[in-house]
Image (cartoon, rainbow, N blue to C red):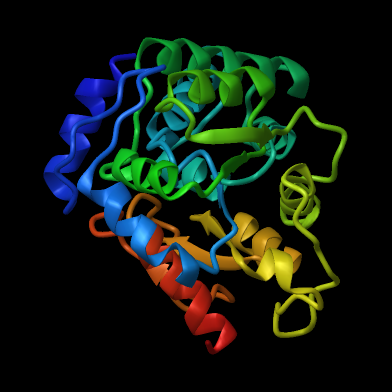
Amino acid sequence: MDVKNQAASSRSSGIMKTKARLPGMQAYSWRQYKVGLCMSDMLLKAVFWDLDGTLIDSEPYWHEGEMEIAAAHGGYWDEDLAWSCSGTPLDHCAKTMIEHGTNLPPEQIAKAMVDYVAKKEFERVPWTNGVLDVLGSLVDAGIPSVLVTTSPRRLAQNVIDHAPAGAFAGFVCGDDDLPHKPDPAPYLAAAKMLGIETGVAGADGAAALPGIARCVALEDSATGIASAVASGATTIAQLGFNRNAKADGPQCASIDGFAGITAEALNAFIRQRLGS
């Protein structure tokens, strides 16, 4: 994956114009200088990223794979059915495909889906427009990111391996021994990974302890948003890449793309939520 070219492409839709850093190369920009001046005002502790439909525009890969598998094994599957399974665990999607005539055991369907998407993503990681700018801004500000996904480990690791150097501190994936979204466990695990305190979320989604409330979770699906909100993280819905995404959910805020989203912009969401 040519991160430099991808970053240059994504910057055409954003406001940042600095050059991408090559892996292992330390670079300084006007953005770092600016961020350094205001770090004392930075409440943001970390950013937690959903994968499919948020960090990468991979839903088309999943949908193509599902339709190909269904057609090859006597089932019926279309785009509407595919979208109905977006953001849900693989076993749920596999069982739904069986209900629509796909003549394969659920574990074989799930494996075939992952194999299809892995092949596509190993050839090209489909970064969402502008997301590399956001990652670059967070790296410059010294804010860690964690990938929080229901996708299996090999897909999560591939994205981490192709991300800009230093962008991710780690990931939580569907192969981990944790309840899946919409349970808050994946986001609580991400906070624990960074040593950030967590608390029991109240009815309004606010954390009893301040640490995870100062983390932004970026999600696109109702399942993922429910997970992030229940964890106590400041949840922002990304509406730009998922046709099922809704602006009236329990999230703290919604955005329809990544143009203009920086560490400072995400910090502003934290300030707004905490009333500071």
Judge whether 140 appears above or below 223 on screen. above
Q: Position of residue 229 (x, y in %)?
A: 67, 68
Q: Which of 269/203 is in front?
A: 269
Q: Which of 98/125 is in front?
A: 125
Residue 164 sits in which quadrant? Answer: top left
Quadrant (top left/top right/bottom left/bottom right) for the N terminus: top left
Q: Residue at x 74, y 33 (%)?
A: 91
Q: Residue at x 57, y 22 (%)?
A: 155
Q: Which of 150/84 is in front?
A: 150
Q: Position of residue 58 (x, y in %)?
A: 42, 33
* Residue 216 can be seen, yes or no: yes
Q: Residue at x 36, y 66 (%)?
A: 265
Q: As drawn, which residue projects farthest toward the bottom?
A: 275
Residue 55 sits in which quadrant? Answer: top left
Q: Which of 204/69 is in front?
A: 204
Q: Position of residue 192 (x, y in %)?
A: 79, 48
Q: Is residue 169 left or right of 130 when viewed as pictured?
A: right
